[in-house]
Amino acid sequence: MKRKIVLIILTSNVLICYDSLLGADSSALNKDYATKEDIKMVIKLLEETKDSLNKRIDDTNKRIDDLRNTMLWLFGTFISIALLLFGFVIRNLWVLGSRVKAIEQAYEIQRDEINFLKGLVEKLVVKG
C-alpha cells in the first residue's frame, strides 16, 4: 500500500517536474501532446526511481534487522548478568541465614546453661 502511494507521488512529481528531468531539452513542454519516446523516458525514470527506492527500503530493513539482533544480544547479556547477581545475593543470604540459626542455637544453649548455673548458685546461697 505504501509503495503504491509512493509510486503515485513520484509519478505526479515526475510529471510536474518534467522539465528538470529532461534537462536542457524542453521542446517536449512546448507540445500539447507527449510522444512515445517521452512516455518511454518517463517510464524509464520511474522504474529507475522505483528500483532505487526499493534498494533503500531493503537497506533500511537490513539495518533494522541488524539493530534488532544487536538489541537481543545486549538484552540477553544484561539478563544473564542480572540473574548471576541475583543468584549470588540469594546464596549469600542463605549462608547468612544458616549462620544466624547456628548463633541462635548457641545462644539458646548458653542461656539454658546460665539459667542452670543461676539455679545452682541460688541453691548454694540459700543453703549456705
Image (cartoon, helix red, strand yellow):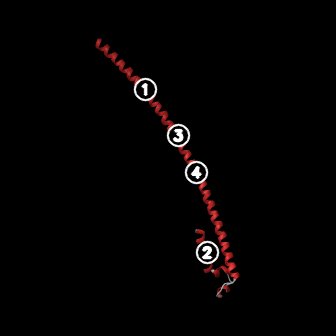
Give the secondary structure at mark 4.
helix
Of callouts 3 and 1, which one flags the residue occurring earlier in the amino acid sequence?
3
Disc ID at residue 74: 4
Q: Residue at x 28, y 14 (%)?
A: 126
Give the class, few, some or many, for how many residues have Cα within 10 Å of label 2's Cα (few <14, many ≥20).
Answer: some
Give the secondary structure at mark 2.
helix
Of callouts 4 and 3, which one flags the residue occurring earlier in the amino acid sequence?
4
Q: Is residue 3 above or below residue 71?
A: below
Disc ID at residue 87: 3
Q: Amino acid at mark 2?
A: Leu
Residue 30 horizontal/vertical position (percent):
65, 88
4 or 50, nearer to the observer: 4
Q: Residue at x 68, y 81 (%)?
A: 38
Q: CA distance from mark 3 to mark 1?
A: 27 Å
**CB contact under 8 Å: marks 1 and 2:** no
Give the secondary structure at mark 1.
helix
Say which residue label 1 marks: 105
Q: CA distance from mark 4 to mark 2?
A: 40 Å
Q: Amino acid at mark 1?
A: Gln
Say which residue label 2 marks: 10
Q: Residue furthest right?
A: 37
